[in-house]
Image: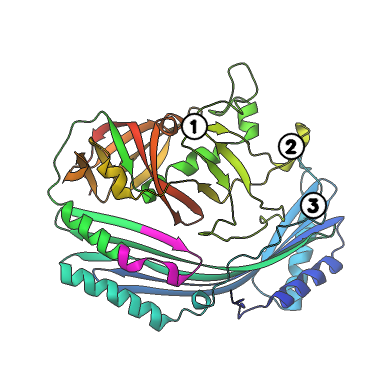
Amino acid sequence: MTTTTNSIITKDQALSLLETIIKQSKADGVFVTVNAEESALSRFSENQITQNLDRAQVKVTITSYYGKQSASAATTELDAASIEDTLNRSQTLAQVAPDDPEWVGLLPLQQYDPRFPANDEATANFSPLQKGEMIQQVAEKCRQNGVDGSGTLSSRVKLQVVGNSEGLRACETGTDANFSFTARVGTGSSWHQRSSYSINNLPVNYIIDKVIERAIASQNPREIQPGCYPVIFDAAAFADLLPWIIWNLDARAADEGRSFMSSAEGGNRLGESLFSPNVEVWRDGNHPLLQTGTFFSDGFPNTRLPLIRQGKVENLSYSRYWAQQKETSPTGAFYPIVMSGSDKSLTDLIAETKQGIFISRAWYVRYVNPRTLEVTGMTRDGTFWIENGELAYPIKNLRFNQNLPEMLNQIDDLSEVQRFGGTVVPGVRVKGFNFSSVTDSI
C-alpha cells in the first residue's frame, strides 16, 4: 500500500522536534507527543451540502516529571519560542503539582508488532470536488425516491509520534474515512453508517439503497405492547451496545466490587462462563477491516489480545498502576474491539426467525445501574416486526431497559462483520430483550 505523507509536518520533522524537546528538558523525566491531523468533513441535509469543514493541525503535548509530580502543557505553534515556552510551562507547573499517589515510572523502549497501519493514498488525497460528486450522487438518489437525505462524509490522514527521556520512541501514520446516512419520508426513517481505512472501500451505493428502502418501508408504524421479545440487531445498532461491556472489563473496578465482573466472594469473575458461547471478542488492530496503529497514546504496545472466548472473559484491563499493585502485567486499553461473526447475512438471520423485532439503531444509550451494567435507550430509524422470516411491518419505536451481560448471554446467532469507527461487530440475534415503553420518536 502506498505510504501517504502529512503536508503540515513530515515524520522526520516530527521526530526531530521530539528529540529537540527531550534534549532541552531540565526535568527528571519528560514525555512528548506530536499529533498531526488533516481532516475533511462534509455535512448534507435535505438533499444538499450544508457544511464543509477542513482542518489541519499539529499539536505538541509535553509532560514534565519531578519525582512523583507531573504536569502537561500543549501548543499548536511549532516555532522555537512557542516550543520553549510550552516546555517551561510544563516544568513550572510540575514543580508545584501535588505528588501522584498512583505514579508509575516512564515507559522504557518498547517492542511493537512488525506491521504498518493502513495508509491509503486515495483517502489522503480525497479532494473537495470528489467529495461533492459523491454527495451529489446521494442527493440525486434521494430525490428520485422522494426522500430527504442527510448525513456526513469524512476523511482523515493522521501522524502520531511519542517519545520520552527513558528512550521510548514510536511513530506511525494512518488514514480513515466514514459515511453516515439518514433518509426520512413521511413518518418513516432509516439510518446506517460505515467506516474504513480507504474512502474507496465505503459501500456508499449499498448504504444509500438499503437506507432508502427501509425508510420507505418504515412509514405508518404500528404500536406493539412493551415486553420481552426476540430481537435481531443490525450490526450498526449492536456496535452501540457491545462497547459498554468491553469498557467495563476493568480489573480494578472488578477487584474493588464496582463492576458486573466483581465476585460476591471478593476478587473478580475472570474465566467464568458469563455469555453465550457464540461471543468471541478480541483487541485486534490488525483485523483486515481495521489495520490501525501498533501503540497507544502513551507508547504502550497495542497487540492482539483475546478478551472473551466462547462466552468466557479471558482478560481484564490492567492499568500500569493496578498491574503493579497486583503483581501482574499491564494490558493497555481494550481497543479496537473486534467480535467474531459468521458467513451469514443479516437477511439470513431474519429468514431464520419466526417472530421478533428488528432494530436498525440503538439511540441515546445511558447507564441505569453501572454496577450491574443495566442500560436504557431507544430504538430509532427503522424498527420492524419480524413474522415468518420476513420484515412484516414497521412498529413504533420502543424504550429498552436491559442488563447487557444478560443480553450477551442470550445471543444465539451471528451475521457477517462490519466496521463502525474503531469497532468491528456482526449483526446478532438475541433470544430475549426487554422493552419498557413505547416512544413517539422516529
x 41%, y 39%: residue: 366
Q: Residues within 10 Å of mark 3 (few under 14, many from 20)?
A: some
Foreground mark, 1 or 3, reads: 3
Give the residue number, with chain letter if any, for mark 2.
Answer: 323
Q: In this view, does 176 lie above or below 132?
A: above
Q: Residue at position x 72%, y 52% from top?
A: 300
Looking at the rendering, the stretch of residues picked out in magenta corresponds to 193-206
Left or right of residue 294: residue 382? left
Q: In screen coordinates, is 11 left or right of 2?
A: right
Q: Which of marks 2 and 3 is nearer the N terminus?
A: 3
Q: Is mark 3 on a helix, strand or loop?
A: loop
**Rendered view: 223 above or below 38:** above
Residue type marked 3: Leu
Q: Is residue 342 left or right of residue 187?
A: right
* Residue depicted at 62% across the width and 16% down the height: 265
- Give the residue displayed 53% in from the left and 26% down from the top: 273
Looking at the image, is mark 1 or mark 2 earlier in the sequence?
Answer: 2
Amino acid type shown at disc 2: Ala
| Relative horizontal placement of residue 99, taking residue 197 as reference (left or right) | right
Viewer-proximal residue, 119 or 362?
119
Q: What element carries label 2?
A: helix
- Image location of residue 206, percent across then percent down: 31, 64
Q: Could you give the CA–CA distance between mark 2 and mark 3, rounded to whole angstroms?
A: 14 Å
1 in relation to 90, above or below: below
Residue indicated by mark 3: 107
Image coordinates for residue 311, horizontal then vertical, percent: 51, 32
Three-letter residue code for mark 1 = Pro
Q: Earlier in the sequence, mark 1 or mark 3?
A: 3
Q: Where is residue 244 in the image (x, y as percent from the top left)?
A: 48, 40
Residue that mark 1 sits on: 370
Q: Which colour scheme appears in the figure?
A: rainbow
Q: Is residue 289 magenta?
A: no
